[in-house]
Image (tube, coloured by chain):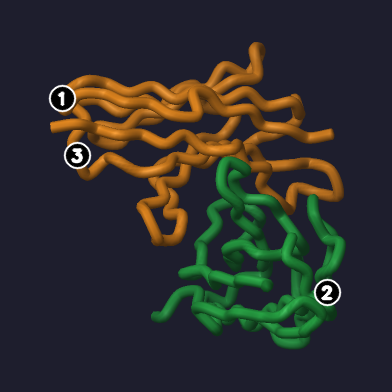
């Protein structure tokens, strides 16, 4: 059981570039989440999904898009990266919206 | 809106002492309260959780208490050890849009000195 995995682990982008972060889970969880973590601000929810084909906005959704075409995968897209999106991104999954299991994180720097 | 406040933001204790971290939540309908530990450069990991129908829960040196009336809950770590040094996050299950998400506090950086 790999649990929750994320690719890539690190990425450096230039302002205006686009990229997609991939999250995969092998626990058959219905719920998946994308967070960003910035110093002193804890974990802020970007978007989440309560099942295959569904997505919903979280606390800080602007500048990001997501898709959940398969139950085990949740993709986070940045269409035009900005320096304000420099952060560590964590994916998580859960069954029933309670206990969340986190991936190892992706460290993104936008120059 | 839904909010979770966490105090203190930093906490320094001597090895063997106790540490207490407190959180307050705004949504009186919240019914689930987990605590996560995040070591430097690692992912957050669940260490203990409590549901709203329980007032206290213990797991070895860690305990969580919940006061629904006051809308606050606390993490207690006894006999602290250097390996307890980490950032701790509290969270409350948000109810807006369904019971689908957790609202996190800003975190407490705990340092345990030998």
With respect to residue A101, does A54 lie above or below?
A: below
Rendering colour (chain A): green
Q: Residue at x 81, y 49 (%)?
A: B98
With respect to residue A62, does A8 lie above or below?
A: below
Dot 3: element: helix
Q: Which label was assigned to residue A65? A: 2
**Residue B94 visible in the snapshot:** yes
Q: Residue at x 18, y 35 (%)?
A: B81
Residue A43 place in picture, x, y as percent: 61, 50
State the residue position of label 3.
Answer: B82
The residue most toward the front is A111
How many angstroms separate mark 3 from mark 2 (CA)? 41 Å
Residues marked 2 and 1, same chain: no
Left or right of A84: which side holds A40? left
Crowding at label 3, few (<14), some or many (≥20) Cα neighbours within 10 Å? some
Q: Residue at x 60, y 66 (%)?
A: A89
Q: Chain of mark 3?
A: B
């Amino acid at each position: 059981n790999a649990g929750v995995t994320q690719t890539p682990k690190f990425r450096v982008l230039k302002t205006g570039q686009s990229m997609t972060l991939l999250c995969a889970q092998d626990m058959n969880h219905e719920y998946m989440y994308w967070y960003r973590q910035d110093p002193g601000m804890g974990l802020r929810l970007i978007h989440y999904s309560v099942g295959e084909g569904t997505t919903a906005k979280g606390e800080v959704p602007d500048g990001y898009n997501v898709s959940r075409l398969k139950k085990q995968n949740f993709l986070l897209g940045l269409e035009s990266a900005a320096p304000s999106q420099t952060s560590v991104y964590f994916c998580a999954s859960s069954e029933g919206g309670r206990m969340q299991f986190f991936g190892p994180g992706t460290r993104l720097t936008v120059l | 809106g839904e909010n979770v406040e966490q105090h203190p933001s930093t906490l320094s204790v001597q090895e063997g002492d106790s540490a207490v971290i407190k959180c307050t939540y705004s949504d009186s309908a919240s019914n689930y309260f987990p605590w996560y530990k995040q070591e430097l450069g690692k992912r957050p990991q669940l260490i203990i959780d409590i549901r709203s129908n329980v007032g206290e829960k213990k797991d070895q040196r860690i305990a969580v208490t919940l006061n629904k009336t006051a809308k606050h809950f606390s993490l207690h770590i006894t006999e602290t050890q250097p390996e307890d040094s980490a950032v701790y996050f509290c969270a409350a299950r948000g109810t807006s849009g369904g019971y689908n998400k957790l609202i996190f506090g800003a975190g407490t950086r705990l340092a345990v000195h030998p």
